[in-house]
Image (spheres, rainbow, N blue to C red):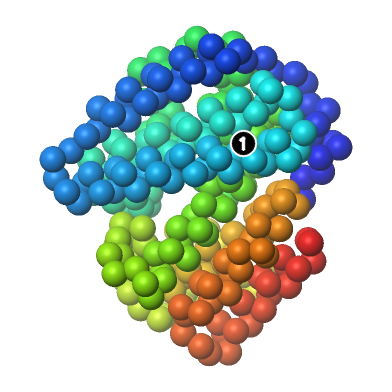
């Protein structure tokens, strides 16, 4: 788990409020270009815009909780703003958010950022950190040989993103939700079957590779296993307070295999509080 005292010592990256708002406006204009007359397409675009806004709030909260200076808070917010910018082109072209049957959305996003010069007004070192954090936000792990800055901001966006996906999952699976969106569950087979590799990873205390997901049950298990990849104590605190694991577990088939995986992830959270 990332230590505040260690990460607070990373080298200073500078960004002004003017640069932040210029970047914000460029990104907003790009996202606005994806308006659609097709209801299901626009619904999914809206889903991603709303998700992005919440991830920005999560990233800001984590950065402030870690006593970051103003530049670091702004950089964390920009990474959150841009982390899923590739989702719009992805859904327009492939009608899915599943990277494994389309293209990696972080790489689509980086191409769009480059093509539309969205962050060109920022200092080169800031641009580099933002691009790498976006690239690593959805990977199985952040490379250990990256700089402290890249690891720090990658960990913030990974936690901020996962916290909102867990929030979305609880709302999506709620019995009160009468308008479930199959795109959220990546159009996976709505089955109670569990992939053996997903189970093996969770029992070993590892975040499963999402390529192994075959069913909605696998998807829910991977979401519960997000806790293996959280980096900050505040993130664990939020998971515990909001009972994300219990809410997801309550929607799953009750058998010994599921009970044991739930027990393992729950203990992991408790051990970090």
Q: Which residue is mark 1?
A: 60
Q: Is residue 199 visible?
A: no
Q: Percent position (x, y) of residue 166?
A: 52, 59
Residue appearing at x 61%, y 31% in the figure: 76
Rendered-image quadrant of the C terminus: bottom right
- Furthest toward the left, the residue is 37
Residue appearing at x 56%, y 62% in the figure: 208
Label 1 SS: helix
Q: Percent position (x, y) of residue 221?
A: 52, 70
Residue appearing at x 27%, y 65% in the figure: 179
Q: Percent position (x, y) of residue 206?
A: 65, 63
Name the one closer to the observer, 220 or 238.
238
- Furthest toward the bottom, the residue is 255
Count of numbered circles in the view? 1
Residue appearing at x 41%, y 80% in the figure: 193
In the displayed structure, does residue 47 sit left or right of residue 166? left
Residue 189 occupies quadrant: bottom left
Name the one closer to the observer, 37 or 122.
37
| Number of other residues with Cα within 10 Å of mark 1, as a class: few under 14, some 14 to 19, many 20 or more | many
- When the figure is inspected, residue 61 is found, relative to residue 111, above or below; the finding is below
Name the one closer to the observer, 241 or 197.
241
- When the figure is inspected, residue 139 is found, relative to residue 175, above or below; the finding is above
Q: Is residue 220 visible?
A: yes
């Amino acid at each position: 788990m990332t230590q505040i005292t260690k990460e607070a010592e990373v080298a200073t990256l500078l960004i002004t409020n003017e640069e932040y708002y210029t970047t914000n406006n460029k990104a907003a204009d790009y996202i606005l270009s994806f308006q659609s007359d097709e209801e299901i397409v626009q619904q999914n675009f809206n889903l991603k815009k709303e998700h992005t806004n919440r991830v920005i709030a999560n990233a800001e909260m984590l950065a402030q909780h870690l006593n970051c200076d103003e530049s670091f808070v702004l950089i964390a917010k920009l990474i959150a703003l841009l982390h899923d910018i590739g989702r719009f082109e992805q859904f327009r072209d492939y009608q899915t958010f599943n990277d494994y049957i389309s293209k990696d959305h972080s790489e689509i996003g980086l191409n769009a950022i480059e093509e539309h010069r969205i962050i060109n007004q920022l200092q080169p070192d800031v641009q580099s950190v933002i691009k790498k954090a976006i690239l690593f936000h959805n990977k199985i792990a952040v490379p250990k040989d990256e700089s402290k800055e890249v690891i720090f901001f990658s960990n913030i966006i990974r936690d901020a993103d996962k916290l909102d996906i867990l929030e979305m999952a609880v709302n999506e699976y709620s019995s009160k939700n009468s308008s479930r969106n199959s795109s959220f569950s990546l159009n996976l087979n709505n089955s109670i079957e569990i992939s053996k590799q997903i189970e093996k990873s969770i029992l070993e205390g590892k975040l499963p590779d999402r390529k192994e997901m075959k069913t909605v049950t696998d998807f829910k298990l991977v979401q519960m296993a997000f806790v293996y990849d959280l980096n900050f104590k505040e993130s664990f605190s939020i998971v515990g307070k909001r009972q994300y694991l219990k809410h997801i577990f309550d929607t799953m088939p009750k058998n010994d295999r599921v009970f044991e995986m739930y027990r393992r992830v729950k203990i992991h959270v408790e051990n970090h509080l």
